[in-house]
Amino acid sequence: MIRIAVIGVGHIARHEHLPALKQSPSFDLVAAVSPVPVDLPVPVFESIAALMVSGIAVDAVAICTPPDRRYALAREAIEAGWHVLLEKPPTLTRSQAQALRDLARSEGVTIFAAWHSIYASAIPRIRSLLSDIDPVSIAITWKENADKWHPGADWLWRPGALGVFDAGINALSILTATNAEPVVFQEARLDFYADQQAPARAELSLTGGRTACPITASFDWRHDPYSEIWEIRWSLPEGDTLCLAKGGAHLSRGEHVIPLEESREYAGVYRHFAQLIDTGEMSLDLRPLDLVSEALAYGARCRH
């Protein structure tokens, strides 16, 4: 069993990471780190430093804090000799991620960017279906309500936060994982509200594939909480269509629904993390982060 500690015990950690770890045959949750009191069946420490001196043996950590804190925490963990899982996005910038990868390599530990959406049961089927087909176009619609999924999380809108891309990057991770060729940024429009420092809505134009097919992405984090949409639609030659809906839980081709196993994304995340640790490898895919960074750097900004 790999002895693991969870760093940051917010909504996603409580509802996704902890249940997945409880069911995992590879991991044993031995501790947690949280700056605020939380009730867990394992010891909880205020900092990584306090965990280090506690005497509790740790092999790995899952860092589930807001993105702007992950780089410094990951450095501490790697220097302690621990394997590191990073919630998405792994860091705020490519340079931070590259520095962590170099440090992990020098320390001989695994670092893993956990793009959880690519572990939906539909993703292997999509890869297989698109392996010999060039889409004519791709349209992403990813619209949800931030207050519903992250109640009271004001960090979502602070400088250094990704705003709507905290959710939209999930769609981009699916796009890059299922697209055989590089996806290229073209332009973006970003909508900011009140005094928030991160966008609440975004429209992206991209290209991808051997034929540089047009890709559009529409992201909204102020959407009606009762009519949320998580959909990617691939328009295929001769009028055929492949559609991923419900964030990865539903797949159809034309009028035909493709049967899928129940999606257990975080079970897949931890299964892969255990395999990487076992083989001494690492996985730090930065393609979704690159697209978001380019949109934030070069997108037209609209203030409401």
Image (cartoon, rainbow, N blue to C red):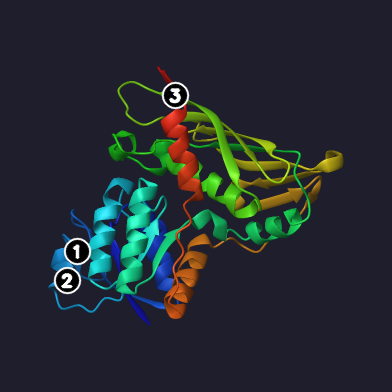
- The tag on residue 48 is 1
In contact (CB < 8 Å): disc 3 and disc 2: no
Judged from the image, the secondary structure of the residue bearing numbered disc 2 is helix
User: Mark 3 is on which residue type?
Assistant: Asp
**Residue, disc 3:** 191
Q: In the shown orientation, is residue 295 left or right of residue 155? A: right
Residue ID for mark 2: 52
The answer for how far apart the CA atoms under marks 1 and 2 are is: 6 Å
Q: Nearer the viewer, residue 183 or 278?
A: 183
Q: Earlier in the sequence, mark 3 or mark 2?
A: 2
**Does 161 sit above or below residue 20?**
above
First reached walking from the N terminus: tag 3 or tag 1: 1
Task: Provide the secondary structure element on which disc 3 rests.
Answer: strand
Along the viewing direction, whichever of 213 and 122 lies nearer the viewer: 213
Kindly identify the amino acid type of the residue bearing the numbered disc 1: Ile
Q: Are marks 1 and 2 in contact (CB under 8 Å)?
A: yes
